[in-house]
Image (spheres, rainbow, N blue to C red):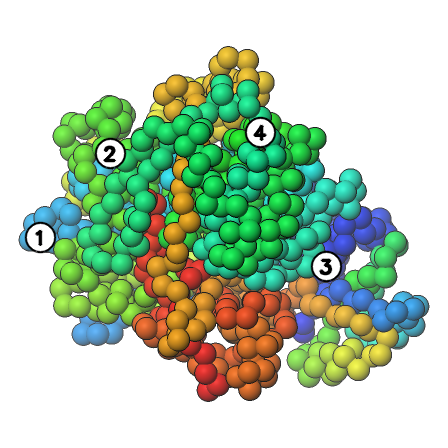
Amino acid sequence: MNRRDMLKHMVAVAAMSTASALFPGIVFPNSQFENFISEESLTWKKSPCRFCGTGCGLLIGLSKGRAVAVKGDPASPVNRGLCCVKGYHSVMALYAKDRLTKPLIRKNGQLVETTMQEALDLVAQKMKETIDKNGKDSVAIYGSGQWAVPDGYVASKFMKGGIGSNNLECNARLCMASAVTGFMTTFGVDEPMGCYEDIDHADVYIMWGNNMAEMHPVLFSRMLDNQMRRGAKIIDFATRTTRTSMASDKSILFKPQTDLAVANAIAYELIRNGWLNESFIKRHTTFKKGKTNIGYGLEDKFAFTDEPKEASFEEYKKFLEDYKPEIVEKVSGVPAKDIRFLAALYGDPNKKVTSFWCMGMNQHTRGTWIQNLVYNIHLLTGKISTPGNSPFSLTGQPSACGTAREVGCFTHRLPHGEVTSEHDRQHAADIWKIPVEKIPAKPTYHTVEMFRALDRGEIRFMWIQVTNPMVTMPKLKRYRDATKKEDRFIVVSDVYPTPTTDIADVILPSAMWIEREGMFGNSERRTQHFEQMVDPPGECISDAWAMIEVARRLGYKDLFPWDKSNHVQEIWKEYSLFHQGLDHQMATYEALKSNPGVMWPCPDGKETKWRFHSKYDPAAKGGSWDFYGKPNGKAWIWIRPYEPAAEIPDDEYPFWLNTGRVLEHWHSGSMTRRIPVLHQAVPESYAEINPDDAKELGVRHGDKIRLTSRRGTIIIKASINERGVPPQGMVFVPFFDESLLINELTLDAFCPISRQPDYKKCAIKVEKA
Amino acid sequence: MPVKSYLAYPADGKRDELTRSLQKLPGCEIIPSENTDVIVLITDTPDAEAEKSLEEQLQSMESIKFLTLVSGYEEDPMPG
């Protein structure tokens, strides 16, 4: 088979796999799959996909030192051989023509090439000068949920154990911080209790503001397969009509932010109808209430600390009197009968229910609360931690769980526990062999506040890695202007030029994905190893090794004694010391190398599919459920009210602005827009607008419209009745297009508990341009 | 020299007609599903002009109800 025949086979298999996702049960002639390129001179090696948080297992075809082909790994329990369109083209992201291959330093306003050694010397020198002049909290590292585990671990050890500053954050703050605080406040430990196998057991999937058909297409195809094979039902509960809505058994639209009210109304109905698992509630839950009217974080140095107080079932029941379906219908726009329909699904003792969510609930000024309220529903009915009964928070990035959350790449976190805990600091200090006093006990800046501190001048040096904040920060202009202020020094590690490299003083070219060794951790607690399969181009090095080089230049050689040839293995061994014990034991390096991923906790090499139930989880005691993250083993049912969004449409700005992603593009598009077929499929961003609004404005599909908020304006093409359809009064814009920066308009309001911004709700006006 | 794959869905009752039409087009190969009307179409054209011409022919076919691009590679998919 020649190269051209191989390409034809690849595109054919991609199309057949996509057809399988769109039309469950579809059959193609077996002969089409036989004699494929496996007999060719390719070497196939396993890796998790570079893109979303699903963590699909891929087989990468290698030839003559290059990655030339991709197929789904049939041995992976995540995707069972299927990929989405991004996955099939993932290796092409390695080879676009404008790949950054040499370090660049800004001199007299121009970026000029230099050597890696000189660039690293300059980064170390500037870090030292800044610390000497302004203190250790004037330098910061801002990383990513796309960091591999070794990158995040080195960043944490460097900043917290070396420099002695908690100025470490990552972009996962923008995508799943509310999921973390939701887990922590309800269960006391982070990450989902279930796994993707829940899809094969559940009778009903309820999607809370989650367009899985585009954002997690491989998982959605598994749901469609179950829908077709055994009649599982998909219920879409969302603020706009999407591809997910179209494939669902029922689509229910709600007004932005009112998911809080609807969740409480479902709980009201569960109680009113007696659809409670009373013995479960009594044995495994306790009731709590927190502060209300908690603000939106719009002002600098905003501070909030919740104060959980004891509550009772009777108090909860009385609180829910304000959430009768007919009352909530007026707030949410959801007919009372549909609220009762949802309650009946959750309340049916013969139905297994899995709830899915992602950015809709996470990017929410009451993101922690809405997670609490969905957990309430599962706890009231006892539908949790058993196959098919799962409240399931999905992530968007390949290692938002594995690196950002588990390694703890946030200002308040350590690789195990939090900096505010003396016990956790001592634990880290013992493993890192440093004095415990080295690790500061007080968190510094969460992401939005870190960029505000850069603006105010408290931070003067920032090293940005594997992320593109000059596209993705909300209220973008303020933070872009901050980077340009005098006496700010910005280092950017990335693989392609972006709006963020545009503002850099030093650009370090990164080795990407399979050009280095690493691990990602996906949404179902599965850690997946990938080896270095190809050489990185030019002078590219991994972000972990770049930080080790700089740390050594600053005098922290003892913290990073590893040899380049085996540092990933040594890092994994050291990092695993943080997660000893039944509740979070990680797989061994050897097990990760030989398996298509392993779910933690895996004591004695046995992975745990469902946590918090003794039948499945060796850390759980007592013969049934044990929410061991809380001191008494009981999960918390929270009394949380509906509170409105930070900014709501008014006469001057009458539309909601909702932002998000599309199937073909990964986040800010810096990789997928360089893959021709993905770029051609969606070459530019657009504004979805309701047909009735368009008619009123005299706008037709493809016309240019001007969107304006109190913070900025853009001109963009209108999309009418195409991929998604928002309700009247809402506009939806994808954020992947760096030439149409929708975050010029968004608001930097955030959940006061998680500090995660809300990209789904602000007020704009719409005019024909 | 683009190589691309599409999913083609025929207009009502026109599966056989669509299959025949696609088989006749130069640079086209098809893989019809065995249990649905969906047809996988693979195109292999010598240059961008030929590809554009082929796309125009595909779009003008009355027997096609729905055509969606799935995957594709240019002449050198892995430059550099």
Tell me which label, 4 or 1, sits earlier in the chain.
1
Residue name at image x 14 percent, y 30 percent: A437
Q: Quadrant of the N terminus of chain A?
A: bottom right
Q: Secondary structure at mark 2?
A: loop
Residue A632 x, y percent position in the rendering:
39, 19
Tell me which label, 2 or 3, sits earlier in the chain.
3
Residues beneath discs 3 and 4 located on the same chain: yes
Mark 1 and mark 2: span between their CA atoms?
A: 23 Å
Residue name at image x 32 percent, y 67 percent: A476
The residue under label 4 is which amino acid type?
Leu
The residue under label 2 is which amino acid type?
Val
Give the number of the disc on residue A419.
2
The residue mark sitting in front, 1 or 2, is: 2
State whether residue A459 is above or below residue A270: below
State whether residue A55 is above or below residue A112: above
Give the number of the disc on residue A276.
4
Residue A303 x, y percent position in the rendering:
22, 47
Residue that badge 3 annotates = A15
Mark 4 and mark 1: span between their CA atoms?
A: 58 Å
The residue under label 1 is which amino acid type?
Asn
Is label 1 in contact with label 2 (beta carbons under 8 Å)? no
Residue A318 x, y percent position in the rendering:
44, 36
Residue that badge 1 annotates = A134
Mark 1 and mark 3: span between their CA atoms?
A: 57 Å
Please report, as a chain letter, where disc 3 is located: A
Tell me which label, 1 or 2, sits earlier in the chain.
1
Front residue of A384/A18: it is A384
